[in-house]
Amino acid sequence: MIRTLLEDRDTFVARARNRLLAEPEPRRRYGDAVLGDHNLPGFDPEPERIAGAKDAAVLVPVIFRPEGGRVLLTERAGHLRKHSGQVAFPGGRADEGEAPLETALREAEEEIALDRRFIQPLGYLPSYYTRTEYRITPIVGLVDAAASTTANPDEVERVFETPFSVLFDMDRYRLDSMMWEGRRRSYYVLDYPDAYIWGVTAALIRILYERLSQT
């Protein structure tokens, strides 16, 4: 099943529609358990930060080539004040009153000129709460192979594709750590020579794989 999932577009789409959320996850109440950086070693749940988290959304853009499924990723521009040089999904903070899908599609257009007409939304992953006080709603979208992208130099250094065979290989993942706010915090790293994929991006890829591969 996993091999078919990696290679066959129709199998991926059917499984995604069955395993992903049909609607965005509602905001959790104060004190509720959440998915996110707070679940990693060295980071205790902080209800106040979770309750006040700012809304954001990302697009997980999946595209199928003859050799199998791939995910479009971006490398953020080096001059940015925050998260410069990091590998990320297209996305960002929501505008006032903006739905997660609209945020993700707008940001994909702004960052990499990915026309929303070439994107078929398949479903949502649970909201992911970051240690930097964001509540990220990930939307998985199937991108038409005919779509083109162009990196916006104000925000993105490059756009690249990474195969499922790499992203969904759990043996490539490891936990690393750093000091942050006076404590050692853990995060996932995906060992891949073509790009340093870590943090929220690596965590969301793992969560997507777990959702799709569960029996």
Image: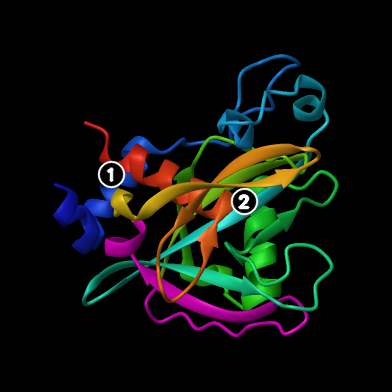
Instruction: Tell which of 66 and 123 is nearer to you.
Output: 66
Q: Which mark is residue 72?
A: none
Q: Residue 131 location, x and y as percent? A: 72, 39
Residue 126 in picture, x, y percent from top left:
53, 35
Is 160 covered by the magenta stretch?
A: yes
- Picture layout, residue 71 above or below residue 173: below
| Side (left or right) of 190 relative to 154 | left
Neighbour tally class for label 1: few under 14, some 14-19, many 20 plus, Cα within 10 Å: some
Residue matched to label 1: 15
In the displayed orientation, state which residue is furthest to the top: 31
The type of residue carrying mark 2 is: Leu
Q: Viewed as shown, does residue 171 lie left or right of 153?
A: left
Q: Position of residue 162 (x, y in %)?
A: 39, 70
Q: Which residues are magenta?
A: 144-167
Q: Is residue 187 above or below residue 35?
A: below
Position of residue 129 in the picture relative to residue 49 (left or right): left
Q: Label 1 sits on what residue type?
A: Arg
Residue 98 or 175: which is nearer the viewer? 175
Residue at image location 41% in from the left, 38% down from the top: 20
Locate residue 179, reporting x and y percent: 71, 45
Q: Mark 2: which secondary structure?
A: helix
Spatial separation of the CA atoms under disc 2 and disc 1: 20 Å
Residue in the image at 70% along x and 55% along y: 103
Q: Which residue is mark 2?
A: 101
Res 65 → quadrant: bottom left
Label 2 environment density (alpha carbons within 10 Å; few <14, some 14–19, many ≥20): many
Q: In the image, is residue 108 part of the stretch drawn in magenta?
A: no
Q: Residue at x 62, y 77 (%)?
A: 112
Q: Quadrant of the C terminus?
A: top left
Instruction: Give the residue displayed 69% in from the left and 27% down from the top.
Output: 27
Residue 49, by quadrant, is top right
